[in-house]
Image (cartoon, helix red, strand yellow):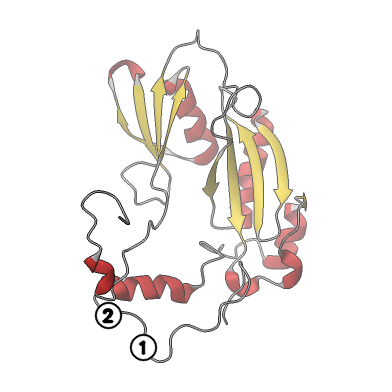
Amino acid sequence: MLGPPGFAPEFLNQGIEPMPVTRMNHAVLYVRDATRTAAFYREMLDFRVVMEMAGGSAIFLQAPASTNDHDLGLFTVGEGVAASGAGRTTVGLYHIAWEVDTLDELERIQDLLAERGALVGATDHGTTKALYAHDPDGLEFEVSWLVPARLITADSQGRMAPLDIAAEKARYGGATRGGVGVSVPAWGSERRRRRAAGAGGLSGGGPPPRGPPGTSPG
């Protein structure tokens, strides 16, 4: 039987597709000291505390432009625990990625992370310009700017090189708003919205032809 308990297969027979997962909502980390880690995210990424449990045992933070209840939860486990061995001696999470709107903002955060000694890498992935950093417990996170779909070209895909933010600002503009989900054209989001509203699919011949991942339909 397709789907989890309670899933109704007749749903598919009616020509209505189930709504997919739309995005990740939040992440939760075990850290040695939630108060210390929360201060780091507040200083580096301008996160704000939305809820704190007594004694700093758990703290929940929201990103500056987020509409989520919270984006990051931190749970204190104490100073005596070992560092994460993920990727070296154990399986586990590699990193969480946070997205910024402009290359100007990415550059500002790069400077802050470097000044703090937290920056560990900066990579040009073609359609994604990414910084990599460690929090106070050595847990890695990414801060990235996504090239808008309309600006993606063949030479900006499938590449990996050291990130030169000054060069990227000269190419795209420091204040250019980044893309959201660059591999999903805007019509895909509209299609899902219309399905949710009961439109039952697209009219007018459907979406434009799909190009390679990361390309814009128009």
Q: Nearer the viewer, residue 28 or 118?
A: 28
| Residue 64 in the figure: left or right of residue 167 | left
Location of residue 134 (image quadrant): top right
Q: Residues within 10 Å of mark 2 (few under 14, many from 20)?
A: few
Which quadrant is home to the C terminus? bottom right
The amino acid on which the numbered mark 2 sits, given as a three-letter code, is: Ala
Provide residue 75's location: percent of width, then percent of height. 39, 23
Residue 71 on image: x %, y % = 40, 42
Relative to 188, say whether 107 is above or below: above
* Residues at circles 2 and 1 in contact by the CB criterion of under 8 Å: yes
Dot 1: few (<14), some (14–19), or many (≥20) neighbours within 10 Å? Answer: few
Q: Nearer the viewer, residue 212 or 63?
A: 212
Secondary structure category for the residue under label 1? loop
**x 68%, y 66%: residue:** 172
What residue is disc 1 on? 203
Q: Nearer the viewer, residue 89 or 48?
A: 89
Q: How many marks?
A: 2
Percent from the top left, x then y, of residue 141? 57, 37
Residue sitting farthest toward the front: 1
Q: Quadrant of the N terminus?
A: bottom left
- Horizontal side of 164 relative to 179 (left or right) equals right
- Element type at marker 2? loop
Q: Is residue 82 left or right of residue 132?
A: left
Residue at left offset 43%, top offset 44%: 63
The reply to whether residue 21 is in sight is yes
Residue 47 place in picture, x, y as percent: 44, 39
Write the residue at 43% across / 90% down.
Answer: 205
Evaluate whether residue 197 shows in this view.
no
Q: Which residue is mark 2?
A: 199
Q: CA distance from mark 2 to mark 1?
A: 9 Å
| Badge 1 amino acid | Ser
